[in-house]
Amino acid sequence: MIYQNAQDWLAAPRKKVLLFGMSGLGKTYLSNLLRAGGEWYHYSIDYRIGTRYMGEHIVDNFKRQAMQVPFLRDLLMSDSIYIGSNITFNNLTPLSTYLGKPGDRARGGLGFDEYQQRQSQHRHAETAALLDTRHFIDRAQDIYGYANFVCDSGGSICEVVDPDDPADPVLNALSESVLMVWIEGSDAHSRELVRRFDAAPKPMCYQPAFLLACWETYLAETGASEASVDPDAFVRWTYGRALAHRQPRYAAMADKWGIRVSADQVGKVKSPQEFEALIASALPG
């Protein structure tokens, strides 16, 4: 770790962290809090994916939909309208909409092969965005004068790295540049995340082998064909399994490559100074 103990962290003139864990436990909350304090640069992995690496895929998908509407098709073909993605740190809907959900096309689903292709695109984009972290640390200081840096990673970071491999290229690159901090949720947090997801199921990125196993099991258990699967029902069924799949991967990342703090502790942080004190408390004394 780039900070060996609490003293190293507190005395460091440049504080650099990467937050990881399930979506909904406080990564973006902390990142926004730190950025609002005026002394931290906020680098969002999902925003980088949706703008630099998948922006063209996202906009092309918008255009495909527009081409199905005669009125919009005529305007698009004559260059009379512009279609773009208004993705922001706090609104990543364009990215999640592109990822989509597999199943019945009449209910907004994608064919499973196309869904796998989009998952692969996201996986490669996430890897590239994570490896861009060093560049953005330097950019934040060189251009804007920020000494402190927070990387707000996506929930699927654990799907694109192997925490048990000491030679993992992404984790090695990250651990040389930032302190990796897992925001760990409790069983109660997991139940709340499942409840929220059931109310508003959203697309997610999965490890290929895990996704394929879930898909095959779901088809076998429900007797549904690929074309008849309810997309929302499938991602709801998969979400709890994804939580259980990711938990030990997050834990290995924290134990071997960083530190952990609890989501309850994060919820009590109200200032950058309180955040710095929380990180210090999680490091060796």
Image (cartoon, helix red, strand yellow):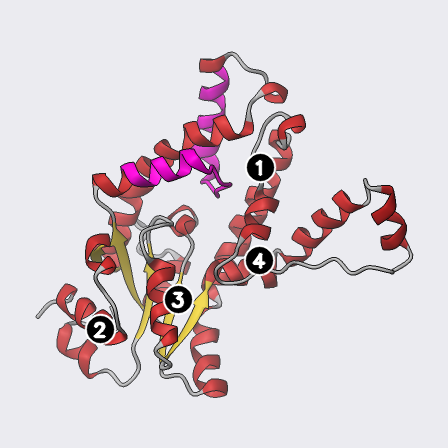
Mark nearer the N terminus (3 vs 4): 4
Name the foreground residue: 146 vs 190.
Answer: 190
Residue carrying label 2? 276
For the point 24% across and 82% down, the residue is: 12
Decide whether residue 185 is among the magenta residues: no
Mark nearer the N terminus (1 vs 2): 1
Residue carrying label 3? 151
For the point 55% across and 47% down, the residue is: 96
Asked if marks 3 and 1 touch (Cβ < 8 Å), the reply is no
Main SS category, magenta section? helix
Q: Residue 64: x, y in percent?
A: 76, 45
For the point 64% across and 30% down, the residue is: 111
Q: Is residue 172 above or below residue 71?
A: below
Real-space Cα separation, disc 3 to disc 4, in angstroms = 15 Å
Q: Quick check: can you spot residue 259?
A: no
Specify start and end residues of the magenta stretch as a single range: 191-220
Residue carrying label 4? 50
- Which amino acid type is shown beneath numbered disc 1? Gln
Q: Quick check: can you spot residue 43?
A: yes
Asked if marks 3 and 4 touch (Cβ < 8 Å), the reply is no
Q: Nearer the viewer, mark 4 or mark 1?
A: 4
Mark nearer the N terminus (3 vs 1): 1
Q: Nearer the viewer, mark 1 or mark 2?
A: 2
Left or right: 45 with respect to 254? right
Q: What is the crowding at mark 2: few (fewer than 14 residues within 10 Å), some, or many (at least 20)?
A: some
Asked if marks 2 and 4 touch (Cβ < 8 Å), the reply is no
